[in-house]
Amino acid sequence: MKILYLNNFRGFEQTYIPFKQVNFFVGENSSGKSSILSLLKLMSSPQFWNNDDFNISDIELGFFNELVSNTLIGKKSFQI
């Protein structure tokens, strides 16, 4: 993966995250570091691609309304 694009996902709106061979996630508390890492782990799981549930095995991202950005009330989708 070279770039991760997030739109209307948790606190991210139209965000591009470029990846290198080694990556560090640094930021203030509640800035989304754990959300990104959980999402990457979820996306690397074959169960994710064959299931419509965002909470599989040891990865819990929450319910749909918790994933959609709070700043966009009324939105019904997010993009990854």
Image (tube, rainbow, N blue to C red):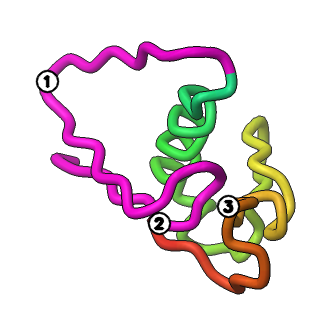
* C-alpha separation, residue under disc 3 versus residue under disc 2: 8 Å
Q: Secondary structure at mark 2?
A: loop
Give yes or no for residue 18 being in the magenta stretch.
Answer: yes
**For this view, does 26 lie left or right of residue 51?**
left
Residue at (13, 24) in percent of width and height: 21
Q: Circle 3 sits on which residue?
A: 69
**x%, y% of residue 3?**
22, 50
**For this view, does 24 lie left or right of residue 61?**
left
* C-alpha separation, residue under disc 1 versus residue under disc 2: 24 Å
Q: Secondary structure at mark 1?
A: loop
Dot 1, crowdedness within 10 Å: few (<14), some or many (≥20)? few
Q: Circle 2 sits on which residue?
A: 7
Instruction: Check if mark 1's residue and mark 2's residue have beta carbons within 8 Å.
Output: no
Q: Nearer the viewer, residue 72 or 77?
A: 72
Q: Secondary structure at mark 3?
A: loop
Residue at (33, 15) in percent of width and height: 24
Checking the image for residue 21, the label placed there is: 1
